[in-house]
Image: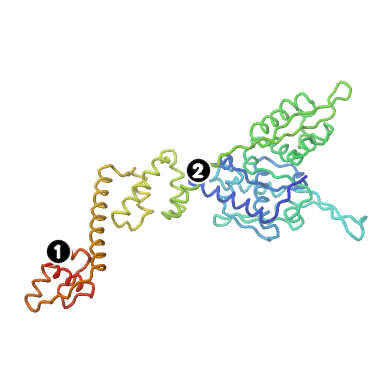
Amino acid sequence: MHQIVSQQQDTTQQQLAFDIFASLDATDTSIVESGTDFHLRKSSLLVDVSELGLLARRVINGVYFLAQANPDAEVHTYDLRYVKWLINYANSNNNTHLKKVIREAQKSSVQVNVIDALNPDDDNWISVPMLGAAGIRKGQFVFKIPSELRSQLRDPARHALLSMRILAGFSSVYALELYERLSIYKDAGLSPVWTLDEFRSMIRVDGLKSANDFRYFRRDILDPAIEQINKDSDIELELKLQRTGRSYSHIAFAIKPTKSLDGTSSIAAAKQLYSTLTDEFGLSDAELDEISANRETWTDDRLQAAIEFVRHRCTVSSVQYPAKYLMSALRDGYRVGSLEKQATEKKVSKAKATAKTAADYEARLKETPLKSVEIPTGEALAAAWATFRQSPHAKLFKVLADNYESAEIRQRKAFEGFLQAQ
């Protein structure tokens, strides 16, 4: 039984991947180390591609993962750094090599039989490249999926849900090929039985001389691929061999799902840090890149100390550019000292006490009806107002008028209360 995945779920998968990329981008962590799975819904038709190298296969998986969120789009455009992260492209600054790999990926093709519903005997066979026009422009990767293959993105008849994290982690192209092919049979628990010649052709080793001798084929290709799949993926394989006479003639695999690695807590922490740097402080891409390049010395503790330092300074003084101040704090290793904390706490406590006294007085002023009081005139009024300005009553106001005549109504009422108290 195959899982049904809607386009909305495809979009959610892609959003999850991008969120993880965004949260880990600041920590220079690869997709393989993310620990959380998001999946490519890969049609069995798209597994059977022409021979490709390991990185070119990752490119194909990456573009089909991206395209599945909007399968009918003519053109897909994504941030180049995000694409490199998806395919685990370690040499991230070497675009020249990446261009060669993309051209290799464009040489991959699949065979499609188009059946005429009115005349089933009138079949058409075509070979379709898996990746159409592709290019790199201003930090963006732009590509097209051939129209003949878009139905395989929308509603594949048979497919496997493949972890992009696991796909990106294989160091052996044979392990990657075997994982893609056998994951389709994960629910059944057992693969079909193939002759050895069929199997060699299927995983593209029929041209290797060493593969003709099963002893070397098993030692150099088959066993290492199974070992890597069992160690680094979400399935476990057991080799099933059949003999014809004294020689092995057929091959199959028992397939058992295993629990995938869980890195959710580290993801959450990294995502929170990324959110703080981008949303709260508004760091630019260049500033995030600088942090990423210095993560060996700019540890989480140093980052948190710098963040706390800038937050503290923002509460006690005016900081015009928090992002630039944070970068300076990171470069110079600034942190909030205990003496500064204590001094700030005293200022805050004093300010709160003053505010409470003023608030209490204002509340009493509102609640207690004042008896009418005679307002002095002339020099007596000026002298009384000067005394009032020095009294606790005046602390209710940040700015107090110089004289009674120019005072606001609230200030005049407070002055009357002052005279009444006298």
Q: Which residue is mark 2?
A: 28
Circle 1: residue type: Ser
Q: Which mark is residue 93?
A: none
Q: Which residue is mark 1?
A: 391
Screen quadrant of the C terminus = bottom left
Residue sticking out furthest to the top: 246
Classify residue 295 as left or right of residue 113. left
Task: Estimate the x, y position of residue 26 in percent, counting from the top left.
Answer: 48, 46
Is 95 drawn above or below residue 365 in the view shown?
A: above
How many neighbours does mark 2 have within 10 angstroms: few (below 14), some (14-19), or many (20 or more)? some
Classify residue 208 as left or right of residue 379. right
Q: CA distance from mark 2 to mark 1?
A: 60 Å
Residue drawn at the location 25% of the way across and 61% of the way down: 360
How many neighbours does mark 1 have within 10 angstroms: few (below 14), some (14-19), or many (20 or more)? few
Under tag 1, what secondary structure? loop
The quarter of the picture where residue 33 lies is top right
Task: Estimate the x, y position of residue 107 in percent, counting from the top left.
Answer: 72, 48
Classify residue 291 as left or right of residue 254. left
Closer mark to the observer between disc 2 and disc 1: 1
The foreground one among 25 and 17 is 17
Q: Earlier in the sequence, mark 2 or mark 1?
A: 2
Residue drawn at the location 23% of the way across and 57% of the way down: 354
